[in-house]
């Protein structure tokens, strides 16, 4: 019998998280069975329980990971100030993210399901969103980011809702116009100092 070290187990666990997060965003949490999730990771269903206590454990881990990656890759890399806010808004409200939910934000893809998840998953979501909005708020009001937290959360809600509506529309021209108009509206409201 081959014994694997801690590094191998950690790497195998990591290999499960990213494809599972993508699958949850594409097919939903309830629509993603353990066997499909393990097949996506190139593992057997039996290997699942060597890495996760339950599907809920994987959901919690995947959501936390997705929000961490989003904060690091989108928010942390955005330019400072108003230019960074515009990068974030236009990147989020893009046809590319609309058309590829597996590559996008868990907010726009699975928020309704996350709200019905267990407390641990909802706490992981809350913790991840707080990091995201802190990054956005620091660009809105670098001198007092805590005062911009609610505004940043409102902006995130506006963007997630807009992306969900855009995905539901069958008229692609209308869906594209919605994304563009809502991005322009959000930036205009921010420039005017109003809540989005």
Image (tube, grey):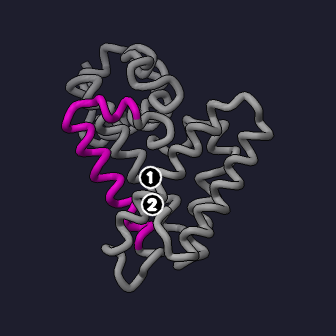
In front of the other: 109 or 188? 188
Residue tagged 1: 69
Q: Kindly identify the residue that appears in the image at 62 percent across and 51 percent down.
A: 93
Question: Considering only vertical position in the picture, is 119 above or below 38?
Answer: below
In the displayed structure image, the side of residue 143 where residue 77 appears, left or right: right
Direction right: furthest residue: 173
Q: Residue at x 31, y 20 (%)?
A: 47
Residue 32 sits in which quadrant?
top left
Q: Position of residue 3 (x, y in %)?
A: 24, 28
- Tell me if label 2 and label 1 are in contact, CB under 8 Å: yes
With 49 as the anchor, is 150 left or right in this view?
right
> Label 1: few (<14), some or many (≥20) within 10 Å?
some
At horizontal 40% and vertical 14% (from top left) the residue drawn is 35
Query: Vertical placement of 177 versus 147: above or below?
Result: above
Give the x, y percent position of residue 115.
Answer: 32, 35
Q: Which mark is residue 18?
A: none
Q: Quadrant of the N terminus?
A: top left
Q: Magenta region: which residues? A: 112-137
How many numbered discs sit on the rendered protein? 2
The vertical placement of 131 against 168, above or below, is below
Q: Identify the residue under disc 2.
A: 72
Q: Quadrant of residue 2?
A: top left
- Is 120 colored magenta in this rendering? yes
Q: Position of residue 176 (x, y in %)?
A: 74, 45
- Magenta span: predominant SS is helix
Within 10 Å of the Cα at label 2, are there few (<14), some (14-19), or many (20+) other Cα atoms? Answer: some
């Amino acid at each position: 019998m081959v014994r694997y070290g801690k590094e191998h187990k950690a790497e195998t666990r990591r290999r499960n998280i990213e494809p599972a997060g993508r699958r949850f965003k594409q097919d939903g949490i309830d629509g993603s069975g353990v066997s499909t999730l393990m097949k996506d990771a190139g593992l057997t269903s039996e290997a699942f329980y060597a890495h996760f206590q339950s599907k809920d454990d994987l959901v919690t881990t995947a959501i936390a990971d997705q929000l961490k990656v989003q904060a690091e890759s989108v928010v942390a890399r955005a330019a400072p100030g108003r230019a960074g806010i515009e990068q974030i808004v236009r990147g989020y409200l893009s046809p590319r993210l609309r058309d590829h939910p597996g590559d996008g934000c868990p907010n726009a893809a699975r928020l309704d399901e996350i709200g019905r998840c267990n407390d641990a998953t909802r706490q992981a979501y809350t913790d991840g969103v707080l990091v995201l909005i802190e990054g956005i708020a620091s660009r809105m009001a670098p001198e007092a980011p805590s005062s911009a937290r609610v505004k940043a959360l409102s902006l995130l809600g506006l963007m997630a809702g807009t992306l969900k509506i855009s995905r539901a529309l069958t008229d692609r021209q209308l869906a594209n116009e919605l994304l563009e108009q809502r991005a322009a509206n959000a930036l205009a409201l921010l420039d005017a100092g109003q809540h989005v």
